[in-house]
């Protein structure tokens, strides 16, 4: 596992940048503040980051960053006066961070046609950087959902207020339906919760969409309240979609946020030790570490075992979305990996055990450890 200051050895440069999209149904819950400051923090930690203003109808990240309005925006990309997205990425006041600005006043930029949106997604994936952070607008328009679904990590931001939670769950559900539509090519009009559950019988593609994992940020709240909110949404997602909602971070309600906006300077630059800034630092590190693992699951996934006179470390983790799989790895004491088994959520193994999302990691781990102990798997002879 890498720290935020290091390159990821398991991710070759050819794989392109990581893409994190920040969305959520409700307006004003803090998507832009969080996305912008996560991007700033990752740049401060030494990564090359591009922040994309994906709020196609209400772009305002240049104001949050306190930089001059970039001369070229997404409008130029969409009307082809800029040949590539990289061309319109403009320096910000933060080293290592550039901005692809939106254009809230241009109707064309707010409503790209399908081909323009696909081109935008392709260009995001090939930006020459380590990480792309996409800030999405409120609501569940197709454009917003498609940018959200195209990311490696979809982060949903909410506050603890009931209306915000309702919109948040509606966003998760609508994104799931859109994912199902994209995978099957069939438009779904009937999407009451019962029909969503029944869709699980339709095949692996549909189940992969339903089993998607969502990383949740609960903004303007305490860690205890965030935990409660995450558990509630996790239960709902499990019951109606078969998916998971994992708490990536809670962010404090902090007057420093308002001060930073009034002074047009990112919080992580202006007041890096403020409570909300340290919460954002924790979020950035958590997202960079990879899939957000529920602390409950995490407790049971690491184990030392003796095998052929050697002490081996067995680690199981949920790879989350978009991989939608659980992975167990066996390490030698020198850190080298001698065995890997990766099982998709939709595999018959989990279905046979009727594993609910929260049990998958434990079941997978126990099955591999048993196989090791019984000699059915010998990691020291042959890597699997
Ligand atoms: N952690 C926080 N503490 C205090 N105030 C906050 C915090 N997060 C956000 N805010 C306040 O909420 C306001 C709205 O935040 P932001 O613009 O990021 O929301 P949004 O979800 O991006 O809205 P929209 O959907 O309109 O794009 C900010 O202007 C700021 O005043
Ligand atoms: Mg916003």
Image (spheres, helix red, strand yellow):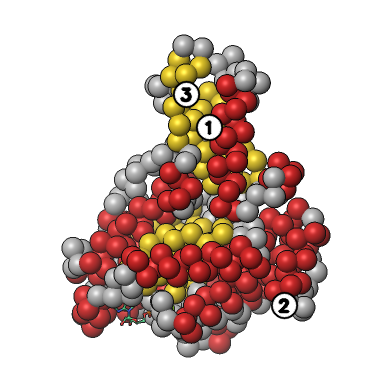
Judged by depth in the image, the label closer to the viewer, 2 or 3, is: 3
Q: Which residue is at a point 71% across and 41% down the rendered structure image?
A: 349
Q: Are marks 1 and 2 in contact (CB under 8 Å)?
A: no
Separation of residues labelled 2 and 3 (CA atoms):
47 Å
The local secondary structure at tag 3 comes to: strand
Where's residue 80, x and y in %? 57, 72
Measured from the top left, where is residue 64 in percent x and y? 32, 76
The answer to whether residue 98 is seen in the rendering is no
Residue at image point 38% right, 62% down: 249
Marks 2 and 3, the one that precedes in the sequence = 2
225 left or right, relative to 190: left
Distance from disc 3 to disc 1, alpha carbons, whole Å, reads: 13 Å
The answer to which quarter of the image holds residue 224 is bottom left
Is residue 265 visible from the viewing direction of this image?
yes
Q: Name the quarter showing ligand 1.
A: bottom left
Report how far apart the C-alphas of labels 1 and 2 lie in the structure: 39 Å
Mark 3 and mark 1 in contact? Answer it, CB < 8 Å.
no
Task: Please name which of the two marks, 3 or 1, marks the residue nearer to the observer.
Answer: 3
Residue 183 x %, y % = 74, 61
Q: Which residue position holds label 3? A: 305
Comparing 356 with 259, the one in front is 356
Q: Which residue is mark 2?
A: 192
**Residue nearer the viewer, 35 or 207:** 207
Who's the residue at 51% across and 58% down the image? Answer: 153
Residue closer to the observer: 109 or 324: 324
Residue that carries the numbered disc 1 in the rendered image:
329
């Amino acid at each position: 596992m890498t720290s935020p200051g290091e390159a990821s050895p398991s991710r070759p440069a050819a794989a392109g940048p990581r893409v994190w999209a920040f969305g959520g149904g409700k307006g004003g819950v803090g998507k832009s503040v969080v996305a912008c400051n996560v991007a700033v923090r990752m740049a401060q930690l030494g990564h090359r980051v591009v922040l994309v203003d994906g709020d196609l109808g209400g772009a305002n990240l240049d104001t949050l960053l306190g930089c001059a309005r970039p001369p070229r925006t997404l409008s130029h990309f969409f009307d082809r006066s800029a040949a590539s997205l990289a061309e319109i990425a403009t320096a910000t006041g933060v080293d290592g961070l550039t901005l692809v600005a939106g254009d809230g006043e241009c109707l064309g930029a707010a409503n790209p046609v399908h081909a323009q949106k696909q081109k935008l997604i392709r260009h995001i994936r090939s930006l020459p950087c380590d990480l792309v952070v996409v800030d999405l607008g409120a609501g569940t328009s197709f454009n917003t959902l498609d940018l959200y679904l195209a990311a490696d990590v979809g982060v949903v931001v909410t506050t603890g207020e009931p209306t915000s939670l309702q919109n948040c769950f509606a966003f998760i559900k609508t994104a799931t339906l859109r994912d199902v539509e994209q995978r099957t090519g069939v438009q779904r009009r009937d999407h009451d919760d019962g029909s969503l559950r029944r869709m699980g019988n339709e095949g692996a593609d549909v189940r992969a969409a339903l089993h998607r994992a969502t990383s949740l940020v609960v903004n303007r709240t305490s860690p205890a309240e965030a935990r409660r909110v995450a558990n509630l949404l996790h239960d709902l997602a499990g019951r109606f979609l078969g998916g998971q909602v994992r708490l990536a971070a809670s962010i404090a309600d902090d007057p420093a946020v308002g001060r930073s906006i009034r002074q047009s300077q990112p919080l992580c630059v202006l007041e890096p030790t403020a409570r909300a800034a340290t919460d954002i630092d924790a979020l950035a590190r958590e997202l960079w570490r990879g899939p957000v693992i529920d602390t409950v699951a995490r407790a049971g996934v690491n184990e030392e075992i003796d095998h052929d006179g050697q002490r081996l470390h067995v680690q199981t983790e949920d790879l989350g979305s978009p991989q939608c799989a659980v992975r167990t790895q066996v390490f030698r004491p020198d850190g080298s990996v001698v065995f890997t088994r990766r099982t998709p959520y939709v595999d018959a193994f989990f279905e046979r055990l009727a594993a609910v999302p929260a049990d998958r990691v434990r079941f997978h781990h126990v099955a591999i450890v048993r196989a090791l102990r019984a000699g059915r798997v010998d990691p020291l002879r042959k890597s699997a």
